[in-house]
């Protein structure tokens, strides 16, 4: 923070008197730049930052990033101060306050810069009688509001012993202050980016690790799929012993022993044989897909670990790269975080969860398509869950279980161990005439009963994305 003698030194170096204010560029709520022009210096820039822990002003050679929004004070400056000529600049003796007297189309205005700490900092525009016209920060309790009289602080003796001008290098004190605070700002931004990246790393790698554990569990559970084929082969080789209506049969197996096979009494002998072969094929598909998914997830975990280790492992990464790694998600992430509700992913399928009636309605109107799948818990209030459909791809059971688990978590059924749900395609939903917002009735629905798996839910919540609205 600048002291009174440093402010005096900065002002002494600046060609302010006679310069014209040509443009105001806002950077954020606390900072802006004047683009000025003088006969001696031609075009030059002056940066102001006020109300922060690093508040200062100085001549600068760098135009900071422009703000995406324009606040009221900047709009006033553009309408009433741009085009003004700076007639004089006066600092209150011994104080961190100075005033620019401006003239524009015959109208005189005063622009006060007060570099006090805390709530005392402000930029104030007054008329020639010191009646406040506009302020950067309105503070009625301090008598700082439009239409009030601005009270200038009393002068003090200059105290160079207690408030010396810091030692500096370079051509001028202005260039030193500009470089000092820009470098400090970059260090702070770097620390913020590293901190954000650490949190992002922990969340992403934890989510991948949870997915890997979940897939390994699926591999273990599906590893016995060959037994279905063996049972099918045994039934096929002894099909003459099978009768309709049997619920079990004991047969010789291929190792010389015997085995009792459970049958479905509602199926024919050939139907029971076919059923075991179908279970074998389905189990084989689930197992092979899980093995492939595990390989991809492990590769992804290794790649992302190397990526974060490189970014966080030293000073080689530039600030631009660090900020980009935090601020710019991948194309897939952008797709996942756009729109209302919470976004999740399961085996490449996007899952969208509404949290209230308004979001449910918005999801159905703006996000869901006819061939997407809709889920909801039975007998409890809760959010709608949408599984985005994929062309020529059916939804795997595990994806359905993931979506169902989320539906339970975001409903009044949360905390129960076993919950009934139903699901159908979005095109089979019917809106209720004059019903509440988002209220629909499903048709052609199917039932689903889920036993809540805390590990599954934890993995999903770690990978979830919430909209920025």
Image: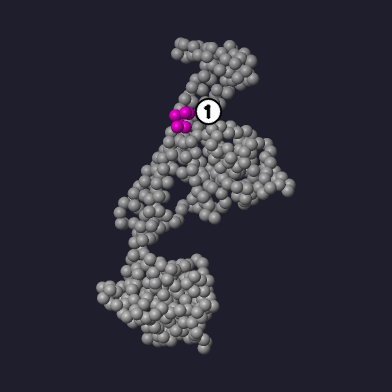
State the count of labels.
1
Residue that appears at 42% across and 76% down: 113
Is residue 318 located in the magenta-colored stretch of the structure? no
Residue 53 at x, y percent in the picture = 38, 66
In front here: 229 or 33?
33
Pick the quarter of the image with the C terminus.
bottom right
**What is the quadrant of residue 389 in the picture?**
top right
Residue 55 at x, y percent in the picture = 38, 69
Can you identify the residue that label 1 sits on?
281
Q: How is the image coloured?
A: one colour
Is residue 221 located in the magenta-colored stretch of the structure? yes
Report the side of 78 relative to 178 (left or right). right
- State the SS at label 1: helix
Res 393 visible: no
Residue 373 at x, y percent in the picture = 61, 41
Against 71, residue 443 (above or below) is above
Pick the quarter of the image with the N terminus.
bottom left
Res 68 visible: yes
Q: Which residues are magenta?
A: 217-222
Against 119, residue 152 (above or below) is below
Against 69, residue 425 (above or below) is above
Residue that appears at 61% across and 14% down: 246
Residue that appears at 39% across and 73% down: 115
In front here: 152 or 63?
152
In front here: 310 or 2?
2
Residue 215 at x, y percent in the picture = 45, 35
Residue that appears at 38% across and 60% down: 189
Q: Main secondary structure of the magenta part?
A: helix
Farthest right residue?
Answer: 433
Against 371, residue 135 (above or below) is below
């Amino acid at each position: 923070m600048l002291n009174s003698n440093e402010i005096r030194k900065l002002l002494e170096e600046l060609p302010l008197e006679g310069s014209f204010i040509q443009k105001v560029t806002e950077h954020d709520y606390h900072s802006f730049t004047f683009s000025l022009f003088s006969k001696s210096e031609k075009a030059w820039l002056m940066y102001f930052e006020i109300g922060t822990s690093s508040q200062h002003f100085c001549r600068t050679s760098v135009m900071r990033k422009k703000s995406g929004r324009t606040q009221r004070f900047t709009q006033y400056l553009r309408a009433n101060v741009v085009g003004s000529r700076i007639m004089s600049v006066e600092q209150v003796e011994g104080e961190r306050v100075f005033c620019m007297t401006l003239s524009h189309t015959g109208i005189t205005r005063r622009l006060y810069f007060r570099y006090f700490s805390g709530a005392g900092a402000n930029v104030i525009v007054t008329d020639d009688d010191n009646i406040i016209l506009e302020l950067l920060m309105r503070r009625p309790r301090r008598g700082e509001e439009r239409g009030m009289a601005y009270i200038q602080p009393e002068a003090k003796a200059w105290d160079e012993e207690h408030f010396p001008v810091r030692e500096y290098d370079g051509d001028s004190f202005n260039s030193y202050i500009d470089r000092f605070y820009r470098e400090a700002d970059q260090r702070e931004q770097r620390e913020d980016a590293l901190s954000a990246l650490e949190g992002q790393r922990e969340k992403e790698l934890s989510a991948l690790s949870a997915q890997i554990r979940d897939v390994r569990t699926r591999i273990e559970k599906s590893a016995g799929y060959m037994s279905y084929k063996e049972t099918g082969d045994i039934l096929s080789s002894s099909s003459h012993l099978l009768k309709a209506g049997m619920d079990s049969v004991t047969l010789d197996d291929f190792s010389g022993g015997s085995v009792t096979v459970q049958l479905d009494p509602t199926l024919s002998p050939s139907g029971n044989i076919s059923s075991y072969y179908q279970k074998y094929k389905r189990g084989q598909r689930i197992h092979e897909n899980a093995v492939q998914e595990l390989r991809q997830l492990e590769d992804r975990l290794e790649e992302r670990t190397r990526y974060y280790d490189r970014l966080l492992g030293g000073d080689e990464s530039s600030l631009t790269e660090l900020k980009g790694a935090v601020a710019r998600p991948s194309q897939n992430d952008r797709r996942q975080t756009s729109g209302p509700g919470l976004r999740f992913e399961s085996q490449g399928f996007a899952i969208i969860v509404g949290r209230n009636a308004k979001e449910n309605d918005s999801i159905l109107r703006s996000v869901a398509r006819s061939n997407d799948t809709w889920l909801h818990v039975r007998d409890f209030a809760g959010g709608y869950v949408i599984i985005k459909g994929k062309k020529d791809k059916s939804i795997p059971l595990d994806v359905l279980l993931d979506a169902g688990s989320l539906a339970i978590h975001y409903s009044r059924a949360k905390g129960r161990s076993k919950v009934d749900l139903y699901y159908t395609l979005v095109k089979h939903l019917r809106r209720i005439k004059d019903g509440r917002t988002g209220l629909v009735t499903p048709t052609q629905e199917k039932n689903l009963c889920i036993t809540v798996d805390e590990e599954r839910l934890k993995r999903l919540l770690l990978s979830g994305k919430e909209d920025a609205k």
